Image: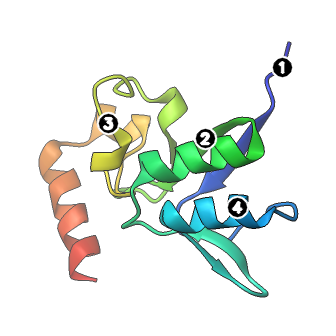
Amino acid sequence: MVQDVFRVKVGEWFNLPKLERNDFMELMRSSIYYKSGSGFIIRESANMANAKRALEKVLTKEVYITFNCAICNKEADCSTCEYKYYCPIETTGGTCICNDCIQEKSLADYIASVKLIIQG
């Protein structure tokens, strides 16, 4: 049986079905932003665990939050990461690396990439 999953990428706008007022407010309290005409977005600075919990509650389905790899810019997905049980999502701040870079790159590469992201 295939489980119903909603995928959302950090930093990209997405749409949701019409929400009840209480559900909309729940999302706003959980670091998910809304802009009329654009939809919803989870920013890199958001508390990912709160955003994920709120979306799962409102949508009543499992939510996968994806990121762009800080090193190669390829999509990274916590659901396939070998460290998902050791790396709490709320500490990553939307800055993560893909499985390929985990294997091929060094920690120094990751730290250098994160510094560039932080400096803007």
Q: Measuring 24% from the left and 63% from the top, which residue is drawn there?
A: 113
Number of the label disc, if any, that sits on residue 64? 2
Spot occupied by residue 80 in the image (x, y as percentages of width and height): 52, 28
Q: Distance between the residues labelled 4 and 1?
A: 29 Å
Q: What residue type is labelled 1?
A: Val
Mark in the foreground, 4 or 2: 4
Residue 33: quarter of image: bottom right
Characterize the local packing of mark 4: few (<14), some (14-19) or many (20 or more) Cα atoms within 10 angstroms: few
Characterize the local packing of mark 3: few (<14), some (14-19) or many (20 or more) Cα atoms within 10 angstroms: few
Spot occupied by residue 8 in the image (x, y as percentages of width and height): 64, 53
Spot occupied by residue 85 in the image (x, y as percentages of width and height): 35, 22
Specify which label sits upstream in the sequence, 4 or 3.
4
Q: How far apart are marks 1 and 3 (CA)?
A: 26 Å
Spot occupied by residue 16 in the image (x, y as percentages of width and height): 80, 61
Assign a secondary structure to mark 1: loop
Assign a secondary structure to mark 2: strand
Q: What residue type is labelled 2?
A: Tyr
Q: What residue type is labelled 4?
A: Asn
- Residue marked by disc 4: 22
Which sits in the foreground, 105 or 97?
Answer: 97
Specify which label sits upstream in the sequence, 2 or 1.
1
Which sits in the foreground, 68 or 55?
Answer: 55
Name the quadrant of the N terminus: top right
Assign a secondary structure to mark 3: loop
- Residue marked by disc 3: 88
Number of the label disc, if any, that sits on residue 41? none
Q: Measuring 28% from the left and 72% from the top, which residue is drawn there?
A: 117
Characterize the local packing of mark 1: few (<14), some (14-19) or many (20 or more) Cα atoms within 10 angstroms: few
Specify which label sits upstream in the sequence, 4 or 2.
4
Mark in the foreground, 4 or 3: 4
- Residue marked by disc 1: 2
Q: How far apart are marks 2 and 1 (CA)?
A: 15 Å
